[in-house]
Amino acid sequence: MQIQLEILEEWRMWRWCLLSGIAVWLTAVTPAAAFIAYVSNEKSNTVSVIDTDKWTVTHTIKVGQRPRGIEFTRNGKFVLVAVGDDDKIEVIDTATHQVVDSLPSGPDPELFTQDAAGKLLYVANENDNTVTIIDLEKRVRLGDIQVGVEPEGMALSPDGKILINTSETTNMAHFIDTATRQIVANVLVDARPRFAEFKRDNSEVWVSSEIGGTVSIIDPAKRTITGKIEFSVPGLRREAIQPVGIGITKDGKTGFVALGPANRVAVVDAATHKVTKYLLVGQRVWHMAFTPDEKYLLVTNGVSNDVSVIDVSAQKVIKTIQVGELPWGITFAEP
């Protein structure tokens, strides 16, 4: 009887080891879910499609003249790209990688943002100082909001109640009530504001000033500047440090700021607003986007015509991907 029990126990151990080995093998060979990025190339008038499993460009899509702002629709079926010299927003079908439609905007659309439901699109039109509102379901223009000179940056508050537009020449962040479509506050920031980004908890909105060389921290409730992020890279003149794109992790702990011709991305402690690290990337880093799982941050480098891949947890550049000429914007679909 004792021998039978020992044999049974050995069989159970052998079976457990076998099943464990199979599970480990399956984990090892099952590829991680790949995310797809779309990159607008301002000079070559194309959009590059990047597979993050292979870290390669899988498709190149011909679009209109001077593509810049780019974003997935909320349902992930289409990619919207602002083609500034054609004065419209083109619609790319992600299944066919073809331009299938266009949306009306004002002259020279640059950046845009959507409401949470994916029904409304807010577009900054650089040449006529307006923000255009577009109904995405009917694909019609609903109206315009007059803002400052050369509007560019666009950000919607997490609760959807406030739209931020930055005007490059007026040097302001305009707070727009989305219900009334009226400007309710103007916050003066440093020279040439390019981009705006809210923290997910709505506690702060960050606005980058390209010529001023700073990022202003604004309290959205009080609509006042509470602090500024400043940058200093050894060996570089202050005027070479030009903040543009911003990314803040979902937990609100870490920010990343693209510093243009400084060829670096600044890593910022989002609680203290102090720079903790500078990451060397390609030439003239512009905009950025996290993979949906936030494991990686991809940044566009306009002069070197490539995209740098940053490991977010390691805070290290791990890959460079060649794309089209003068890459500008980048977007991922939310899962």
Image (cartoon, grey):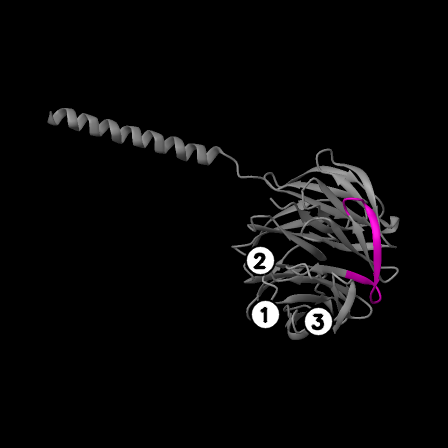
Residue 54 seen anywhere in this rendered image of the structure: yes
- Mark 1 = which residue? 273
Find the distance from the CA under tag 2 to the CA under tag 1: 14 Å
- Mark 3 = which residue? 238
Q: Earlier in the sequence, mark 2 or mark 1?
A: 2
Please report contact status of discs 3 and 2: CB closer than 8 Å, yes or no.
no
The quadrant in which the C terminus is found is top right
Please report contact status of discs 1 and 3: CB closer than 8 Å, yes or no.
no
Please report contact status of discs 2 and 1: CB closer than 8 Å, yes or no.
no
The amino acid beneath tag 3 is Arg
Residue 283 or 257: which is nearer the viewer? 257
Magenta stretch? 136-152
Q: Is residue 83 left or right of residue 7?
A: right
The amino acid beneath tag 2 is Thr
Magenta includes 30?
no
Q: Secondary structure at mark 3?
A: helix
